[in-house]
Image (tube, rainbow, N blue to C red):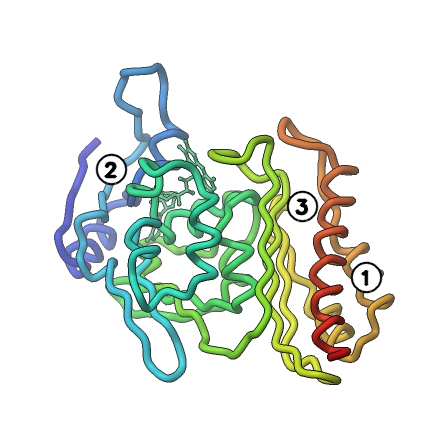
Amino acid sequence: MESFKPLNIEEAFDILSVKDAIIVAGGTDAMVKRRTEPGIVPEFENDVVFINGIRELKNINSDENYIYIGAGCTYTEAAENELIPDCFRTVIADIATPAIRNAGTLGGNVCNASPAADILPLLYALEAKLLIESKSGNRTIPIEDFVVGPGRTDLKKGEILTCIKIPLKEYNLFYYKKVGTRKAAAISKISFAGFANVKTGKIKEFHAAFGSVGPTTVRVKKAEEEIKEMNIDEALQLYGNSINPIDDQRSTAIYRKKVSMNLLKDFIGKVEEKYNG
Ligand SMILES: Cc1cc2nc3c(=O)[nH]c(=O)nc-3n(C[C@H](O)[C@H](O)[C@H](O)COP(=O)(O)OP(=O)(O)OC[C@H]3O[C@@H](n4cnc5c(N)ncnc54)[C@H](O)[C@@H]3O)c2cc1C
C-alpha cells in the first residue's frame, strides 16, 4: 500500500488517473471505517491519496449566481468564512465536536453519503450542485443525482468532488432541527432543513429535506409545488408516502416518521403565518 500527499489538484488527478486509490480528506469517516484496535493505524485496502493539503480545494468565493465552497473546506474553515451564509453555521454548530469540525470536510460528508450526514439536508434544500473533476474533464450535477444510496455516490474512478455550488436565491424563512440522543456530539435520528420565500398571499419558494429517514436524504419536489399552491393536505399526504424510515440502533421507524412530520408541520405553520400576513 502506497500513500500520496499531493499539494495541488493536478498532481492529485495524475495520481488518481493511474492508481486505484482511496481519497482521504479529513479522515474522520475514512479512518474510522478502517480502524482495527485503539492505537493501531487503520488498514487501507488500496493506495491512499490524502487531499487535505490541496489549497485549491479550500477556496470559497461567489459571483452573482452561486457561492462556491471548496470541497476540502473543513467545517471550521467554512463557518469562519464571511461568504458562507448563516444557515451553514447553524448546521455546523450541531455537528460532532470542535476537534472533528477542525478535520472533517464538507466534501467528505457529501462523499461518505451517510443517510445521517448532516450537511446533506441543508445542501438538498438549497438545491446545491456539485463540481466533479478528473484528469479528463469535469461535470456539474445536482446533489440528489450524486448520492445514489447509503454510502454510495456517482463518483467515478479518477474523479474528485472539488466544489459545492450553492445557488443564490432569496429566502426569508430558514428552519433547521437536528434530533439526536443528546444535545451535542450526537449522530442524527432525524434532521430537517427547510427554506422558504413567502410574502403575504404568495409562496415563491418552498424547499424541505429530511435526513436519517430513508436510504438517502429525502426531498419531495411534487409536495413542494403543492405547498406553493397552499394545498397543504395534499402535500402532507405526499410527504407521508415518501418518508419511510427504518428501525436501527439510534431510533425507531415510528418515532422518526412522527417527529419528521411534526417538524415539517411546524415549518409549514411558519410559512402559513407569513402567507396570511
Ligand atoms: C466522533 C465523530 C463524530 C461525528 N459527528 C458527525 C455529525 O454530528 N454529523 C455528521 O454528519 N457527521 C459526523 N461525523 C462523520 C464525519 O466527521 C463527517 O462525515 C465528515 O464531514 C467527513 O469528512 P472527512 O473530510 O473527514 O471525510 P473522509 O473521512 O476523509 O472521507 C469520507 C469519504 O469521502 C471520500 N471523499 C472525501 N473527500 C472527497 C472529495 N473531495 N472527493 C471525492 N471523495 C472524497 C473519501 O474517499 C471517503 O469515502 C462524525 C465522525 C466522528 C468520528
Q: Image height check: is 276 above or below 267?
A: below
- Residue at left 65%, top 78%? 198
Circle 1 residue:
236
Circle 2 residue:
47
Quadrant in which the N terminus appears: top left
Instruction: Give the x, y percent position of residue 135.
Output: 24, 63
Q: Earlier in the sequence, mark 3 or mark 1?
A: 3
Q: In which image quadrant can residue 156 be found?
A: bottom left
Residues 3 and 195: in front is: 195
Tell me the crowding category of disc 3: few under 14, some 14 to 19, or many 20 or more residues within 10 angstroms, Cα based.
Answer: many
Instruction: Give the x, y percent position of residue 10.
Output: 17, 61
Instruction: Give the x, y percent position of residue 214.
Output: 66, 46
Q: Quadrant of ligand 1?
A: top left
Tell me the crowding category of disc 1: few under 14, some 14 to 19, or many 20 or more residues within 10 angstroms, Cα based.
Answer: some
- Residue at left 81%, top 61%? 236
Q: Is residue 22 visible?
A: no
Q: Give the CA distance from mark 3 to mark 1.
A: 16 Å
> Mark 3 belongs to which amino acid?
Val
Q: Earlier in the sequence, mark 2 or mark 3?
A: 2
Q: In which image quadrant can residue 171 be found?
A: bottom right
Instruction: Give the x, y percent position of residue 186.
Output: 52, 34
Q: Earlier in the sequence, mark 2 or mark 1?
A: 2
Q: Image height check: is 144 above or below 104?
A: below
Q: Are marks 2 and 3 in contact (CB under 8 Å)?
A: no
- Residue 277 numbered tag: none
> Is 218 on the left or on the right of 22, as rendered?
right
> Mark 1 belongs to which amino acid?
Leu
Q: Give the CA distance from mark 2 to mark 3.
A: 34 Å
> Is 134 on the left or on the right of 205, as rendered?
left
* Helix, strand or loop at mark 1: helix
- Residue 213 numbered tag: 3
